[in-house]
Image: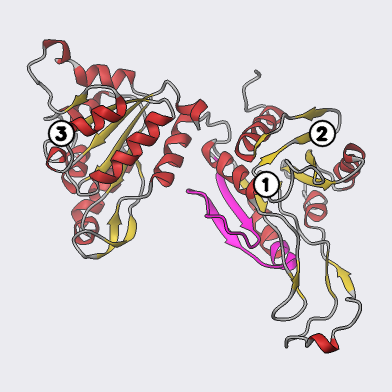
Amino acid sequence: MAKQLAGKRIVVGVTGSIAAFKVVGWVSALAKEEARVSVIMTNAAREFIAPLTFAALTGEKVYTAMFDGDMNEAMAHIELAQDAALFLIAPASAQTIARLAHGMADDLLGAAVLATRAPVVICPAMNSRMFLHQATQENLQKLKQLGYIIVDPESGMMACKDDGPGRLVEWQSAEEVALRCLSRQDLAGEKVVVTAGPTREAIDPARFISNRSSGKMGYALAREVYRRGAEVVLISGPTALACPYGVHRTVVISAREMYDEVMKAVSDATIVIKAAAVSDFRPRHYSSEKVKKDVVQDTIELQQNPDILYDIGHLRDNKKRFIMGFAAESDNLEAEARKKLARKRLDLIAVNDISSKDAGFAVDTNKVTLLDAHHSTTLPQASKTTTAAMIVDHICKMLGTGNAE
């Protein structure tokens, strides 16, 4: 995140809503990532938060009026508009949404938005009935038609005690939209299917066979391809991870469930990244009742699960589909990975050493080697978020859509 935000001018427009207090945390997060944050406050916003709060967090002047008597700031709306990498309006009240939808420029925020060519992200926050009112919905639709990006509010209990849509989204969601706006859109127009996590193969209602996959690598990849502009379908085994914002997630349990969902999802996919640790085998016999420990057999008879990646690779049907797999190995890493690359007809495979304590399952870092038919590239050890970015860079270069750095 820091590499994408450091040094970027982010203009945050704060309007009149009790949710303004949450944006204090947003501005603090942006400042910690070394973004250059300029805050514009409407008159109504100043009734909820003092400008000094934002000034202390950003170390910069807070703008509150079109003309504040300072001749040097007479063209602030133009300077802010030209310098901005992104406009983030949060919370966006019904009043502000209506004014922006009608192109009003009678205050600093409205004028600056009209003057900018930077992406404008609008995060509504208001009473549920106000949000659902036809006028507000029509104004939001008009803003979308004008090219503004709307981050829909969440549902829940609000300060007014109403329960419904209208709560300002959490920073993690707004952050993902901001990062998508500021990232290279080298996967725009692509549909990417990502698999993640383990599968569980049931023995009885209480017991199953599984593995140590946490899903972190697959989720990081789904998040990264969303930031690059792709439509993303994430098919996940059971994990404790939250679905990344903007990603369409389907949760499955068993390898056969994952097989069925993947085969449906890849029908119109252009890129498939299979990072899930799918169980190779399942118990041949499933007991519908919990097996008592005094009658448990010494052995469990297994049968093979379908090989999802093999079938995808052999069912291309002349479609130009990029397919990437992962290989978790403990010895002869490159040799084993190359066998899988060829047998499963993959374009790219990432292999990592699961015996390493800093790579593979259930850790936050990874170190992988990327192999295609002709080349081998070892990536440095890094967080799984950074590793995901490096992998997607590699995919984009292979596709001819990325930078040639």
Magenta region: 230-259
Q: Which residue is mark 1?
A: 363
Residue 2 lies, with reference to residue 312, above or below; the image says above
- Could you classify mark 1 by the number of other residues whose Cα lies within 10 Å: few (under 14), some (14-19), or many (20 or more)? some
Q: Helix, strand or loop at disc 2?
A: loop
Number of the front mark, 2 or 3 = 2
Q: Where the C terminus falls, by quadrant?
A: top right
Which label sits in the foreground, 1 or 3?
A: 1
What is the distance, in whole Å, between disc 1 and disc 3 at their CAs? 51 Å
Mark 2 and mark 3: Cα distance apart in space: 54 Å
Mark drawn on residue 372: 2
Q: Could you classify mark 2 by the number of other residues whose Cα lies within 10 Å: few (under 14), some (14-19), or many (20 or more)?
A: some
Nearest the viewer among 277 and 340 is 277
Q: Is residue 179 visible?
A: yes
Q: Position of residue 179 (x, y in %)?
A: 46, 35
**Residue most extreme to the left:** 69
Q: Which mark is residue 104?
A: 3
